[in-house]
Each structure stands twice: as C-alpha cells, then as structure tokens.
C-alpha cells in the first residue's frame, strides 16, 4: 500500500476528503446564489448570465462532471466514516454529555439526504424542465435567448413548489451550519477561543445562504418580481 492510498483509507484522510469536497460544494452554492440573485436586477441580467454559462459548452460539462464527482466523494466518504465509527463502537453510548451534539450535528445524514432529493427535483424542474408544462409555452426573450427569468418566476408562483424549495434550503442551511464547524475540526484546528468563533461564523454564513436563496421564491409569491411575458 502506498503512503497516499493508506492516507485516503485512514479516518483522517477520509475526513479530509469530506472537508475539501464540502468546500468545493459550498463554493458552488455561493456562486449559484450570486447568479440567481440577479433576478432582482431584471430579465436581461438573468438571461444573459444563463446564456454565458451555456456558451461555455464543453467547459460547462467539465465543471458539471467535477461537481458530480465532489458530491459522490462527499457522500461515499461520509458513509464510510459512519460505518467505521459504528464498527469501532458497536454499543452506542448511553451517556453522551461529553459530546456537545446540536440538532444540526445529529441530523447531518437526514439533512444531507433531503438536500440530495431537493437537488434531483431541482434539476428536473429548472434544468431538464420536465415538471412544469408551462415552461414549454415560454417564448424567447427580446434578444432571442431562453427566458430563464420568466421560467423562475412562473416556477415559483406555485406555493407547493416554493414551499419545497424553502424546505430544501432550510435543510441545506442546517447541513452547512454544522458542516462548516466540522470542516475546521477535520483540518485539525482545535483552539479554545478560535474554534467556537469559527463555528458561530459558519452558522451565520449558513443562515445568510438560507435567507439569500429563500428571498427568491418569497419575492415571487409576494409579486415583488413579476414575469416578463404573459402565458
Ligand atoms: C431559489 C433557489 C434556486 C434557484 C432560483 C435556482 C435556479 C436555477 C436555475 C434557473 C438553474 C438552471 C440554469 C439553466 O439551465 O440555465 C439551476 C441549475 C442548478 N441548480 Fe439551482 N437554483 C436554486 C437553488 C439551488 C440550490 C440550493 C442548489 C444546490 C444546493 C442548486 C443546484 C443547482 C444545480 C446543481 C444546477 C445544475 C447546474 C448545471 O448543470 O448547469 N440550486 N438552478
């Protein structure tokens, strides 16, 4: 066994991969949020942003494949670590006071799974566009681009769809609020003063992500953002 392969089989190595892939995915979540918030700037901003992404062509597919690889590694190594912990500790602790487990930390597997289900639905909704027949009726925008702006607005006019998005993003924030503090621990940072501060910073970051994303369906339902074309 080479030194590098034994590193990736050790629990330190696995935690490292979960942490690094988590950071890549957080990078996507922040970038995607900034892209989506352009809905508040109007149709032209969102549609030209979407068009630029599409013009990346093969590069876009490389980015997608890289993201997918990160999602798969993140899940694979999390499961592997969980199984390892269970094997090392077949009888669960009766008394857990020494571990400060928050609700977020106890629900990491569940929040992660529901976020995954949300992403699959979201891809069917806005990328494959197979869940809402109205999207087929949308005309191109004045610059002959696909009208992603109006698609988002029509998509979120449905209370159930918007409700599911807000739920998905609530669980994403819960997942991130614990994930960010685990990240620093996985990198070996354990300082009496700094660690709790970083954990608080991570929680604030996670809930800002939640507010940012949720503001979009909420603004549509409040008619603060209206479609640019009528169906
Ligand atoms: C209000 C919330 C959100 C809105 C309005 C939104 C909007 C969109 C839109 C419009 C697309 C399709 C872009 C196009 O084909 O031109 C898209 C794709 C995507 N979204 Fe979201 N999104 C939201 C939340 C999220 C969240 C929370 C995640 C992940 C945690 C996510 C992950 C993705 C992924 C992976 C894609 C596919 C990207 C690609 O392959 O091109 N989205 N989103």
Image (spheres, rainbow, N blue to C red):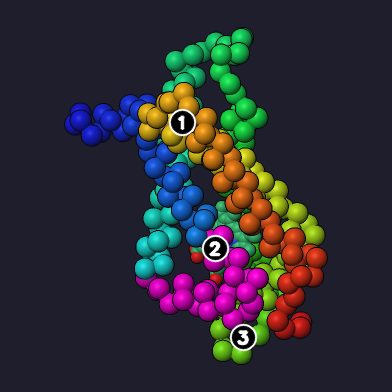
Name the residue at 75% across, 60% down.
Answer: 218
Mark 3 is surrounded, within 10 Å at the Cα level, by few (under 14), some (14 to 19) or many (20 or more) other residues, namely: some
Circle number at residue 83: none
Name above or below for residue 73 compared with residue 86. Answer: below
SS for callout 2? helix
Question: How far is disc 1 from disc 3 in space, using C-alphas?
Answer: 52 Å
Q: Is residue 73 visible?
A: no
Quadrant of ligand 1: it is bottom right
Mark 1 close to ligand 1, CB under 8 Å? no
Work out whether residue 91 or residue 130 is closer to the camera in this orientation and state it: 91
Name the residue at 31% across, 33% down.
Answer: 8
Q: Which quadrant of the view contains residue 81?
A: top left
Left or right: 168 with respect to 20? right
Question: What residue is pinned by disc 3?
Answer: 140
**Whole-percent x and y of residue 35?**
54, 66
Name the residue at 57% across, 88% down.
Answer: 144
Q: Which residues are magenta?
A: 32-58
Mark 3 close to ligand 1, CB under 8 Å? no
Circle number at residue 194: 1
**Whole-percent x and y of residue 138?**
68, 81
Question: What residue is pinned by disc 2?
Answer: 34
SS for callout 3? loop
Question: How far is disc 2 from disc 3 in space, using C-alphas?
Answer: 23 Å
Contact (Cβ within 8 Å) of mark 2 with mark 3: no
Q: Which quadrant of the view contains residue 110?
A: top right
């Amino acid at each position: 066994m080479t030194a590098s392969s034994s590193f990736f089989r050790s629990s330190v190595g696995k935690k490292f991969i979960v942490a690094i892939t988590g950071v890549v995915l957080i990078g996507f979540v922040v970038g995607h949020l900034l892209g989506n918030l352009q809905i508040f700037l109007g149709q032209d901003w969102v549609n030209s942003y979407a068009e630029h992404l599409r013009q990346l062509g093969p590069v876009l597919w490389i980015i997608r494949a890289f993201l997918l690889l990160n999602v798969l590694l993140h899940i694979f190594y999390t499961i592997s670590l969980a199984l390892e912990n269970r094997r090392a500790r077949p009888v669960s602790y009766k008394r857990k006071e020494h571990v400060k487990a928050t609700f977020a930390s106890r629900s990491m597997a569940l929040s992660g799974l529901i976020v995954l289900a949300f992403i699959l639905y979201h891809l069917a909704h806005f990328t494959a566009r197979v869940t809402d027949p109205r999207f087929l009726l949308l005309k191109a925008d004045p610059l002959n681009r696909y009208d992603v702006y109006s698609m988002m607005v029509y998509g979120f006019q449905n209370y159930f769809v918007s409700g599911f998005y807000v739920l998905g993003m609530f669980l994403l924030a819960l997942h991130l609020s614990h994930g960010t503090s685990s990240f620093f621990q996985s990198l070996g940072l354990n300082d009496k003063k700094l660690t709790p501060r970083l954990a608080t910073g991570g929680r604030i970051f996670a809930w800002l992500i939640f507010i940012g994303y949720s503001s979009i369906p909420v603004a549509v339902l409040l008619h603060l953002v209206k479609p640019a074309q009528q169906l």
